[in-house]
Image (spheres, coloured by chain):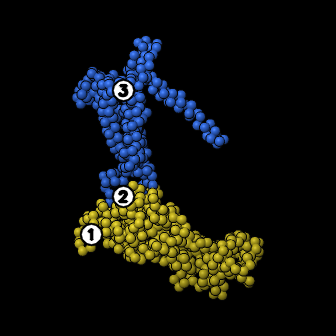
């Protein structure tokens, strides 16, 4: 039960910077998801917390300790690996017991760490196994378990040492879709029951959105944005986050800002969408009349409507059962409109008009890619 | 039916090769064991299975067997431990580690003859650099087998190293990392994680090295010629030296005996070790 704090953490391999000046505070009992495409540095960041990678620069704290030079086993964290990394020659019991054998622990009511007795170990293994429903599998070896069962054993092995923080590296990626959805719920439940800090790495935004207390989005070694799932979705700080979060992703179209009689619009070439007044915090000079911008709007905030302000041509329709994705061309850029699947589908080549909610328009700087409104 | 024919057609080439070079000589060996040749090898006389019982219980055969057995004990454990130590020490990501891996593996490319000549130069009683190292002395019946065994250990080290290294590299890195987080030190990690995971490799090496040791001939012939006082006359050396036509039947029986012993030993090893060997995930 501790916070994990990155202070300007950098990891360099020769000339490659894997993690660049990462500063991030993971609060006590928080479920923090590090999200990003492969190669963005999220796994490296996690491994530095685990003590499996040396830190090139910066300070890493777990609780009130600086752990840069603390050995992995003394960091009081446990990790669930992508492949689970169970010991194939050991039974489930032995696998779960493994973190208790060599390390010393501070037992409740005592102050000095010591090795656990055999009976204490057995009790802890029992507790961990029971909380993950593994009691009937204890004598089996990993080869005799299903993927989902192996995953539970890996989780049990992680919780048995009652660590200050759990580290998970894409633990659901080896499960099939159905089991993955079910395990997501179980992980959230486990987090609630254990009330411990979780640091979870994934490239899957659905996992991030559904489980995280907060999401930290990374790209090319840099932290892009941190926030609760809803905030990250509704107010992306830059184009990367805007395009990475959401499925289908946010539509982004180059345009020009027009201030007309005190109202703001973004002109896309075939018409213009109204944009609600910028927040007070934004410098109005940045959003002067004629500024080039990239306009972003989520597929569910675009509507096909008679008399809508922007003209578009239908270039494709995808029917998904519960909804429809209509691909439309606006001045050479394809945007997706998300529609309910009821009602007649638009036809390929139809010319029609699109509308958008002014307060759901996102504006980004084409050069810096930062958010403007 | 047609499928079966096609199947046999596919295995025909290997059947022919195995038949000509393996099954026929083996059968021929059994056959020769039932006969006694005359002094000039021009005619033979059927003496029957009694030759088997006679030879296999002879002092000559049992002496050879005991020397071959000692040779196994001298070469296999030492060779295995040294090979594994080298492989473990070279199984890491370091600049230039390939150079060491190549050096350690180099004896794979060495023939028995070359290995024996190298050791001839090192420990020959007259001209060897280390002729005064008593516990390996080739001129003392009590120690000569050790000297020969050492050359074998050296020669097989490359093979043991290469195969163990391959076994080590097949162990997923994440398992070692899990062990690191579990607080395993290097020794515990080796005995609790590494060794069990490479046990199939170890099993293979034990069988191969035992068979190699039972078949040792070249190093004996080159380094000691069976001496001094017959102290290094391994079974294969005795078989090879039964070239006198009078001894052909005897030699054949000994060869069959060696074959049977190797078969049994290998079978027992599979049986014993399989229980402790972990295969796959």
Residue on which disc 1 sits: A106
**Spot occupied by residue B148 in the image (x, y as percentages of width and height):** 32, 29
Residue at 38% from the left image edge and 59% from the top image edge: A91
* Residue A302 appears left or right of A64: right
Q: Is residue A102 above or below residue A345?
A: above
Q: Chain letter for mark 3, please.
A: B
In terms of depth relative to the viewer, which is nearer, A194 or A209? A194
The image's mark for residue A9 is none
CA gap, disc 2 to disc 1? 20 Å
Q: Which secondary structure lies at badge 2?
A: helix
Q: Colour of chain B?
A: blue
- Residue A246, compared with residue B228, is above or below; it is below
Q: How many marks?
A: 3
Numbered disc in front, either 3 or 2: 3
List the residue tagged with mark 2.
Answer: B179
> Which color is chain A depicted in?
yellow
């Amino acid at each position: 039960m501790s916070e994990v704090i990155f202070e300007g953490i950098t990891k360099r391999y020769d000339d490659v910077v894997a993690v660049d000046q990462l500063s991030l505070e993971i609060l006590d009992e928080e479920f923090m998801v590090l999200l990003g495409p492969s190669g963005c540095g999220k796994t490296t960041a996690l491994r530095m917390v685990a003590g499996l990678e040396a830190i090139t620069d910066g300070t890493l704290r777990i609780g009130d300790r600086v752990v840069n030079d603390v050995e992995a086993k003394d960091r009081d964290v446990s990790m669930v690996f992508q492949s689970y990394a169970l010991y194939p020659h050991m039974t489930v019991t032995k696998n779960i017991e493994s973190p208790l054998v060599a390390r010393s622990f501070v037992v409740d009511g005592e102050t000095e760490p010591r090795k656990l007795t055999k009976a204490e170990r057995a009790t802890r293994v029992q507790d961990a196994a029971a909380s993950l429903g593994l009691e009937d599998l204890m004598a089996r070896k990993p080869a005799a378990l299903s993927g989902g069962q192996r995953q539970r054993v890996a989780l049990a092995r992680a919780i048995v040492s009652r660590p200050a923080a759990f580290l998970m590296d894409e633990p659901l990626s080896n499960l099939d879709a159905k089991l993955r959805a079910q395990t997501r719920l179980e992980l959230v439940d486990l987090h609630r029951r254990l009330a411990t800090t979780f640091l979870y790495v994934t490239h899957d935004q659905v996992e991030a959105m559904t489980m995280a207390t907060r999401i930290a989005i990374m790209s090319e070694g840099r932290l892009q944005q941190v926030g609760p799932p809803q905030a990250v979705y509704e107010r992306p700080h830059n184009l990367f986050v805007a395009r990475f979060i959401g499925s289908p992703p946010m539509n982004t179209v180059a345009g020009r800002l027009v201030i007309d009689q005190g109202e703001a619009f973004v002109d896309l070439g075939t018409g213009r969408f109204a944009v609600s007044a910028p927040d007070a915090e934004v410098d109005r000079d940045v959003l002067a009349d004629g500024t080039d911008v990239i306009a972003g709007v989520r597929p569910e905030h675009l509507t096909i409507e008679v008399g809508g302000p922007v003209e578009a041509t239908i270039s494709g329709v995808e029917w998904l059962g519960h909804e429809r994705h209509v691909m439309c061309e606006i001045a050479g850029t394809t945007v997706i409109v998300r529609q309910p699947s009821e009602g007649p589908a638009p036809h390929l080549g139809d010319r029609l008009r699109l509308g958008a909610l002014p307060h759901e328009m996102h504006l980004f700087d084409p050069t810096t890619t930062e958010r403007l409104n | 039916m047609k499928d079966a024919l096609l199947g046999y057609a596919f295995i025909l080439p290997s059947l022919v090769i195995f038949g000509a070079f393996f099954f026929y000589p083996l059968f021929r060996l059994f056959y020769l064991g039932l006969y006694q040749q005359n002094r000039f090898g021009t005619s033979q006389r059927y003496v029957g299975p009694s030759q088997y019982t006679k030879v296999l219980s002879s002092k000559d055969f049992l002496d050879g067997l005991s020397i071959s057995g000692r040779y196994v004990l001298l070469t296999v454990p030492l060779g295995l431990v040294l090979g594994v130590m080298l492989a473990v020490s070279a199984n890491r990501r370091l600049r230039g580690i390939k150079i060491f891996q190549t050096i350690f593996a180099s004896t794979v490319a060495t023939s028995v003859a070359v290995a024996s000549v190298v050791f001839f130069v090192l420990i020959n009683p007259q001209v060897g650099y280390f002729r005064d190292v008593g516990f390996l002395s080739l001129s003392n019946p009590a120690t000569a087998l050790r000297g020969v065994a050492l050359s074998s250990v050296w020669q097989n080290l490359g093979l043991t190293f290469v195969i163990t290294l391959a076994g080590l590299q097949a162990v997923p890195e994440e398992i070692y990392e899990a062990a690191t987080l579990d607080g395993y030190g290097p020794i515990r990690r080796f005995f609790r994680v590494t060794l069990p995971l490479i046990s199939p490799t170890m099993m293979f090496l034990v069988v191969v090295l035992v068979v190699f040791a039972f078949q040792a001939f070249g190093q004996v012939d080159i380094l000691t010629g069976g001496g001094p006082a017959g102290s290094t006359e391994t079974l294969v050396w005795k078989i090879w030296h039964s070239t006198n036509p009078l001894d052909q039947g005897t030699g054949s029986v000994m060869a069959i005996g060696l074959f049977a012993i190797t078969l049994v030993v290998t079978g027992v090893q599979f049986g014993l070790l399989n229980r402790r060997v972990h295969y796959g995930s």
